[in-house]
Amino acid sequence: MSDQRLGEFEEIILLLVGILAEEAYAFRIGDEYATQTGKISSIGAIHATLSRLEQKGYLKSLQSDPTPVRGGRRKRIYRITALGQRVLDESRQLRQSLWNQFPGFQDLSFSYE
Amino acid sequence: MSKPSEDHRPPLLAMRFLHWFLRNDLEEEVSGDLLEQFRQKLLITTLFRAKLDYWYQVLNYLRPFAIRSFALSFFMGMFKQNLKISLRHLRRNGSLTWINLGGLALGMMATLLIALWVYDELTYDRYFANYDRIAMTMQNQQFGDHIRTWNSQAMQLAPALRDQYGRFFEEVVTTNYSQPHQIAWEEKKLIRTGNFAEPGVVKLLALELMSGSASALEDPSSVLISASTARAIFGGEEPQGQSLTIDNRMQVRVAGVYRDFPKNCSFANWTFIAPFELLSTTEHYRERLEWGNSWFQVLVLLNPAVTLDQASAAIRDVKKNSINEEYATRTQPKIFLHPMSKWRLYGQFKEGINTGGRIQYLRTFALIGLFILLLACINFMNLSTAQAETRSREVGIRKTIGSRRDQLIGQFFSESALTVLLSFILAMLLTRLFLPLFNQVTEKQVEIPWSSPLFWIISVGFMAITTLLAGGYPAFYLSSFRPIRVLHSLKRPKAVFSLRRILVTLQFGVSIAMIIGTVVIFRQINYAKDRPIGYTQDNIITIPIKSPEIMRHFEAVKRDLMQTGDVQAVAASDVKMTSTYTTNSGFTWDGKDPAFSEEFHTLRATYGFGALVDWQIVEGRDFSEEYGTDSLAFILNETAVKYMDLKHPIGARVQWGTGEDARQFHVIGVVKDMITTSPFEEVHPMLYVLHYGRFIHYLNVRINPESSAQTALTAIEKVITSYDPDNLYEYQFFDQEYAKKFNDEEKLAKIAFYFALISLFISSIGLLGITTLVLEQRRKEIGMRKILGASQKNLWLLLSSEFLWLVLIACVLAIPLAYYYMDSWLAHFAYRIRLAWWIFVLAALAVVGITLFTVSFQIIRAAWQQPVQSLQDS
């Protein structure tokens, strides 16, 4: 088990990167974050988290081709690394194990995978 | 992307700012993202909001990961470094740092306290929503050659104003003066200060009613009480509708509760408001009071369309037109309006013209405050500069090893900023510490306005200016040195010397003036305190008579009191012997000039009053029960004899009143002048007359000096309450009442004393700084002189005389100013000291002494030093 835990915000950002795939760059992630959670976050805050996750090795990034929409500027597309995948998985397993021990939901059966 | 949004661009300044701080490698992606965000915003909102959002996004990129390295070091690294060096520097110069810091902090504290006080005075009465439209009616009246001004009016004035000049006013309200009254509810009795006023007062004061209706006072059996009164009487119970008894005579029902007035307003002691109508019917005012009885206040609320001057000019003759011709020509009454904004600070009138008032003290102290702050700042700059000069070599070394000039400038500025900041924090702590004392001395309740933005803006602005001024010289001047010059040559750059001396002289001038001021104020107070009073105050108490039962059974009360054994004498009077402010006119006597408009202070008393206060008869005799005619007799004081120009006062006939009311009196005695009003005033012409009727308000009792005061007071209470069980028993000692007359002056004396101390202390600090600097610069000279045979005494004389010169010049400048100022202050008092020459000499000597002490300390240290040390190291 990795000793590095993910913060909630970090976890959501990681997941959003996975969901958005080729579209996973700061502005788009922020946009999606707003639609999915209903909360607003500045691009700077998203960017800071992305760069921190990249430093930790959960994400890698590359620059896309220039797009006319952005005045010919390139964007930085993020992808989840294998380590990132594993941390996400650990985080989910921890949650599931906790959910399973929660008596009120014993009889509800969820199937994962 | 729709076409129009293509034309809009994000705010240029924000883009530039972003470009300035953002890491280069992030530039492209971030500006792309932000542009996309901007365009998306444009689709759903206005251009302005999109731009605002862009700014928001840019500012949100001010995060460590995104800021380019130079910017990071600019914000953090350099500051950290500077801070560290500054702290080291401050610590190295231990005592000097503390002196510098403490001096500035003390100056800031003094100024802050004065500023808070001035602010509190300037905002006096501002609480009222109608502040600009409220005014008080005043009247000028002719008395002989003089015009007197007062704010009391006849009860006929308000109706006349309403009828004849109604268009000028929204409200005209008669009120009594706020006085302590007994309020009883069921079994509970307490004394509250409150007033009687006409119903319009609710609107005039824009009373904040917490319950009840604005028209409550229309009903003469209602009362409005303040929230604090409600709490004091009812505790937790609902006050509305409860019945109360005021002074055992007036039944009222609580018709509303209003929010308490703040402390700094003229109405602070109105803790209840009862209808004026109620007072007037209870006391039968309508039947017995006329235009001549100026007993009340009349307040007005001006019509918004009317200016104060218009209304004031219009109502001038309202009284004159309503009274008989003889009275009108004799007194020439002129009514005018005094606006609320001037009540507090401009309350003084001389010959009918406003001559200022409290504002003069305010200006003086504001000036002193500014001066102290200026002195503290000058010192601070002097000392910082002095210290910095000894560091020119450090600057040389720094430059040699590659320091840039802007770095040095930053270094010096952060040093002074740090000191200023520390001083400010210290000043705040000191202020908090001394605020309770200050409030006690000034009888105020000021607080530091922590939450006021203005306060912080001024504070930060002040700190910035001081930092710039104190750090400016070392920052720009020292950093400009060429390293080769400072390191090579022994000569240090010449300092701005003469300016510094002028400043130190100025400081001492201020200190000397303040010392003189303080001594004069204290002497004046003591002089008035030592003034012979002319009668005895020891062991005498005054008991306000609250029930007619006491005077109805006066002889019995007297007998019972004497029987306690604790009482030596009992007599009743209409006013307190310590404040005989009742005046009467309408007297005629043989040889009186018919045009002379006379006025006497009068005191009505029972037999035995003279013996009780132990007055000194100089001619004739005291009132005595052996003569049947004494009820029509006067006793005059010496001033009255002079005033009436009586050659043979005893037996002189005096007529009081005119026409049917006229009564013939004769003078039976003359007493020595006594101080019965203000100890600072001249003694007024005074008439004493026997009286047992309705004017009697006080019982005066002399306690047997053999008895303990406590037992005597309890015994007296027992007797009084047996005749008047309904009212609370109260008493005052004569001497305590008299001591209160010095309150204002003593307050002033204390404030002047404290600020003189602070000013002196700050001056000494300034002197200490300049001595240190001078000695530092003349170290080699001192060394040489010693080698050439100068003794320590020679050196001391040589060096200290230089500073003494400064003090002497300061004396020459300060003494005439202080003389002029204190002379005009003393002119306020009829009974005053002369400005003796020794006060000035004393102040000068004190300052010379302090100078020598401060300077000698440093000089002796320098003179003791081995010349070899000072000459060798360079």
Image: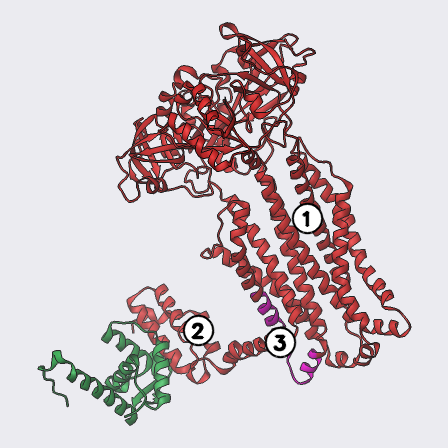
Chain colours: A green, B red
In which chain is the residue bearing label 3?
B
Asked whether disc 2 touches disc 3, contact meaning CB atoms under 8 Å apart, the reply is no
Q: Residues within 10 Å of mark 2 (few under 14, many from 20)?
A: some
Q: Position of residue B834 (x, y in %)?
A: 73, 36
Give, as a single range, the part of the protein colored magenta.
Answer: B394-421
Quarter occupied by the N terminus of chain B: bottom left
Q: Give the CA separation, mark 2 to mark 3.
A: 27 Å
Give the mark nearest the N terminus, 2 or 3.
Answer: 2
Q: Are marks 2 and 1 on the same chain?
A: yes
Asked whether disc 2 touches disc 1, contact meaning CB atoms under 8 Å apart, the reply is no
Quarter of the view holding residue B283: top left
Q: Are marks 2 and 3 on the same chain?
A: yes
Name the residue beneath numbered marker 2.
B15
Label 2 vs label 1, nearer the camera: 1
Q: Give the CA separation, mark 1 to mark 3.
A: 44 Å
Which residue appears at 79% of the width and 59% of the height? B803
Q: Give the CA separation, mark 2 to mark 1.
A: 58 Å
Q: Which mark is residue B514?
A: 1
Label 2 vs label 3, nearer the camera: 3
Amino acid, disc 2: Met
